[in-house]
Image: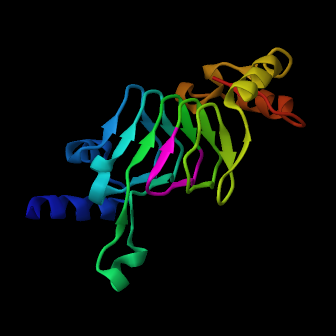
Amino acid sequence: MLKNIKEFVFWKLRGEIPLSAYLKRGLKVGKDFSMEPGCSLDYSHCWLIEIGDEVTLAPKVQVLVHDASTKRALGYAKIGRVTIGSRVFIGAGAIILPNVTIGDDVIIGAGAVVNKDVPNDSIVIGNPITTVGKTSYYMEKHRNNMKVLPTFDESYTVRKDVNEEKKKEMKELLKNQIGYVE
């Protein structure tokens, strides 16, 4: 027990708990899971979180399974499971609250507060969340846009050491429009 507390304090001081620590405590994740820097899963009860395949948590996403608002008055905190389906993207700074199920093929906008279930094939934004569309329509729109708007291969990313010439080209092509990058 003491070793776990020391490890937790060490990770908190460093600013992040590694995915391996969550998995050791019972977090379930599917294949091709990506958790960007600064994400926080409810470490104290992470075994109540289940995440499907091909899920991305953008930077600083928080997933909570407990709510201590009742702790002082009642002596107990509220607690509930969080289930995230497959092919889900959760935008930067979003907060997922306890007792929520997020379906498959979902996009959650940056900064959203997810306080209720999200059905399959949905795009939600805001605080609290509002459904603004279907993921399938959104993807089809952007698939069509890619035929006419600038697209950039991986050589235009820091992963592949983008050069100054490509940075300049990208900046110019994106002056008044969006584009797409691998």
Residue farthest to the bottom, as pictured: 73
As drawn, is 6 to the left or to the right of 30? Answer: left
Rendered-image quadrant of the N terminus:
bottom left
Q: Quadrant of residue 142?
A: top right
Rendered-image quadrant of the C terminus:
top right
Residue 33 part of the magenta-drawn span? no
Identity of the residue drawn at 65% across and 28% down: 163
**Whole-percent x, y for residue 115 in the image:** 55, 57
Identity of the residue drawn at 29% across and 43% down: 27
**Whole-percent x, y for residue 94 in the image:** 57, 53
Viewer-side residue, 165 vs 40 = 40
Magenta-drawn segment: 91-102
Does residue 165 appear in this view? no
Identity of the residue drawn at 33% across and 81% down: 74
Residue farthest to the front, as pictured: 74
Viewer-side residue, 103 vs 64 = 103
Does residue 27 appear in this view? yes
Identity of the residue drawn at 15% across and 58% down: 4
From what the image shows, is residue 151 above or below residue 86?
Answer: above
As drawn, is 46 to the left or to the right of 170? Answer: left
Viewer-side residue, 139 vs 146 = 139
As drawn, is 100 to the left or to the right of 136? Answer: left
From what the image shows, is residue 57 above or below residue 60?
Answer: above
**Whole-percent x, y for residue 111 in the image:** 63, 55
